[in-house]
Image (cartoon, grey):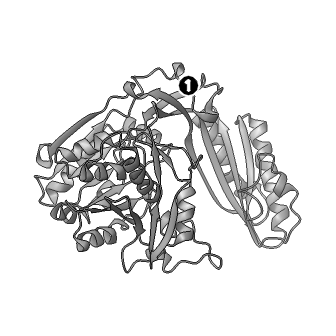
Amino acid sequence: MSDVFLVGNGAGFSGDRVDAPIPVVRSLVARGLPAAMFFECLAERTIALAQIEKRRDPEAGYEPMLERLLEPILADCAGAGIPILGNFGAANPMAAARCVARLARRLGLPALRIGVVTGDDVSDAVDLAALPAHEADAGFDLSAWTLVSANAYIGAAPLAEALARGAQVVVAGRTSDPSLAIAPLMHHFGWAEDDWQALAQGAACGHLLECGSQVTGGVFWDPGCKDIPDPANIGFPIAEVGRDGSLVITKPEGTGGIVDLRVVKEQLLYELHDPAAYLTPDVVLDITGVTLDQAGPDRVALRGARGHARPDRLKVTACYEGSWLGEGEVSVAGPNALARARATADVLLARVRQRGLGRRARADLVGVSSVHDSDDGALWRGYDGPEPPEIRIRLAVESATRDDADQAAREALAMLCCGTAGTAGARWRVTPRILTRSFLVPREMVPTEVTVREARAWN
């Protein structure tokens, strides 16, 4: 058994670059070491949006780009013995498995073994009202909101079980992000579920890789301040994990981006909360003793991660819908654009009030102030800087019904004739608002089930 195992990442969220996995897999195959690929495709609200899609179509509700992500690499991974793991099952892991099976049969791989891990969906199994809320989510009145999804963050053990049963592709719903990397390491090295030190090494690996190119220069990139080479072809990360506790982060040769101490430090601290106690379902990770070394070009070595016993409870993220978001936009340009944009924003807000269309409304002047402003528009109202040559006015309205949200958003369209001189480029849309709240549930209340079948047997 090899003392080094490679872990490659092919996605950091739903919507990531679909061609990113290709050079990662090529690199893993070329190196010839035991390896696995994982795809992290879920944000907090992704499953709720997937559940809404599943309502419309019982065969939907999984990662919409699943086939595009896997088609270029599936045969190569199967041929090289590189298992693929992903939470790309989202709200419908069984349908995602059927999608993978159809792809496998089309590629001439009918014997490909596909594993599915279920049990994360606790919508009907757990009384959320009886659970303690997580961190800052306590005290919110949810009585007017409708539950869309409730999913527990499951750990690595059932994923490793699927691998032990011969799965070459493992499909899951809501998992902890680091667990997708821990599972193949558990399987390869034979780590026990209570080997906290080994699991800490795996959690550090998964945490660094989980956001894809964020550890190879994405988001870190700040032109003129923190430059990276060839950002249009940024390489996704590969971890070299040693039986001796070593961990090296790198990327495929010939790709853009960069792996250096600055980038790895930023990702290591990303969303960590407490550096001494980063909670995952598998282990509590402590990075306060971590050291990093530049081990070569695009190679950073990490040592010193420590692990403590896993939490007794799992995090459950529940998503609710109870209102609608209407958004409308128009543009103004040329001389006196600032005055025309302010007047347009004031009229849009006045129209929403007059018609009683919103619970909450705000206007932003994109190009003057939008990201840092508040609902009262204090920054764009008080702006006294240089006059922008063009401004995009955005109206956002929260409404009780879809129709009210649509009517509010369409007020931006009406400004094409009712607005100031030079108003153009109207667009509008309506989307359901999703509210997320997190709870803590005893892990024994989240039993998981593993199913493994050949592609030919998935119908």
Q: Nearer the viewer, residue 274 or 398?
A: 274
Please give the name of the residue rendered at 41% of the width and 57% of the height, measured from the top-left corner: 205
Please give the name of the residue rendered at 38% of the width and 81% of the height, measured from the top-left corner: 254
The relative height of residue 402 versus residue 10 in the rendered view (above or below) is above
Horizontal side of residue 362 vs 10, given as left or right? right
Identify residue type, mark 1. Answer: Pro
Q: Quadrant of the N terminus?
A: bottom left
Other residues around mark 1 within 10 Å, as few (<14) / some (14–19) / many (≥20): few
Please give the name of the residue rendered at 40% of the width and 77% of the height, measured from the top-left corner: 255
Picture coordinates of residue 263 (x, y %)?
Answer: 54, 68
Horizontal side of residue 162 vs 38, given as left or right? left
The relative height of residue 161 versus residue 445 in the rendered view (above or below) is below
Label 1 sits on residue: 132
Q: Nearer the viewer, residue 70 or 36?
A: 36
Picture coordinates of residue 452 (x, y %)?
Answer: 18, 41
Horizontal side of residue 284 vs 427, given as left or right? left
The relative height of residue 23 versus residue 139 in the rendered view (above or below) is below
Residue 171 seen in the current view: yes
Q: Secondary structure at mark 1?
A: loop
Picture coordinates of residue 6 (x, y %)?
Answer: 31, 63
Picture coordinates of residue 64 (x, y %)?
Answer: 37, 52
Please give the name of the residue rendered at 20% of the width and 66% of the height, measured from the top-left corner: 76
Residue 406 seen in the current view: no
Q: Nearer the viewer, residue 401 or 234?
A: 234
